Image (cartoon, grey):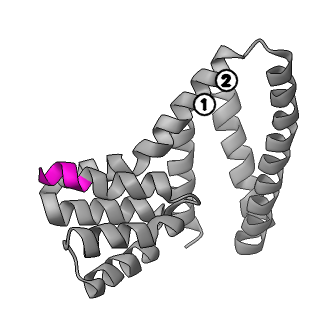
């Protein structure tokens, strides 16, 4: 019964919390503090502060921590799954709907409109990364990282994860 309560405590805010993690925080508080009494208001505020201090989505971090405190490793797993389940189910439903109408001229036109927008957003993001790299490390280091990364990815077909790790190691050893 405890694991079902953990699931409901995080699934319901995931459904009702339109707007992501920050929008669902009051709903999670209502469930874990007022409905089930697993945490006090002070403990919840400490979990919230800890969740804000760490990188990544706040709702899943809080769910993992609270689920672990209440139900151990299985409780943490259930809480994190319950947090992402509404989005997961909605994405599966939308993808199946999109796949069903993939040959529709309207859907093709819509995807043709979305592709340039995504390309532009990725280009702006890449420009910002390069600008920050140039400001932080200088032109020579930025060019070295760009050229070596390009060669590793395109010429020698090295997996991107290895290139990222290599760039991190390079930054830690050379740029520190």
- Position of residue 96 relative to residue 173, above or below, is above
Local packing at callout 1 (Cα closer than 10 Å; few below 14, some 14-19, many 20+) is few
CB contact under 8 Å: marks 1 and 2: yes
Quadrant location of residue 14?
A: bottom left
**Residue placed under numbered mark 1 in the picture:** 94
Q: Is residue 45 left or right of residue 35?
A: right
Looking at the image, which is closer to me, 79 or 141?
Answer: 79
Res. 164 mark: none
Residue 95 falls inside the magenta stretch: no
Magenta region: which residues?
A: 1-6
Residue at the spot x=80%, y=23% of the render? 107
Residue 62 visible at all: yes
Where the C terminus falls, by quadrant? bottom right
Q: Could you tell me which secondary element the residue under label 2 belongs to?
A: helix
Residue 4 falls inside the magenta stretch: yes
Residue at the spot x=19%, y=73% of the render? 37
Q: Is residue 84 left or right of residue 109?
A: left
**Residue placed under numbered mark 2 in the picture:** 98
Quadrant location of residue 113?
A: top right
């Amino acid at each position: 019964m405890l694991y079902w309560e953990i699931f409901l405590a995080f699934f319901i805010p995931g459904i009702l919390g339109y707007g992501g993690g920050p929008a669902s925080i009051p709903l999670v508080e209502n469930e874990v503090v007022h409905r089930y009494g697993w945490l006090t208001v002070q403990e919840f505020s400490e979990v919230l502060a800890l969740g804000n201090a760490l990188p990544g989505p706040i709702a899943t971090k809080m769910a993992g921590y609270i689920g672990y405190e209440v139900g151990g490793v299985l409780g943490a797993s259930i809480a994190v799954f319950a947090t992402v389940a509404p989005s997961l189910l909605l994405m599966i439903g939308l993808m199946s709907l999109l796949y069903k109408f993939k040959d529709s001229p309207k859907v093709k036109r819509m995807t043709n409109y979305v592709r340039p927008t995504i390309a532009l957003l990725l280009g702006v993001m890449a420009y910002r990364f390069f600008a920050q790299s140039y400001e932080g490390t200088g032109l020579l280091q930025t060019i070295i990282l760009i050229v070596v990364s390009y060669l590793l990815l395109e010429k020698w077909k090295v997996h991107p994860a290895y290139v990222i790790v290599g760039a991190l190691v390079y930054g830690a050893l050379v740029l520190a």
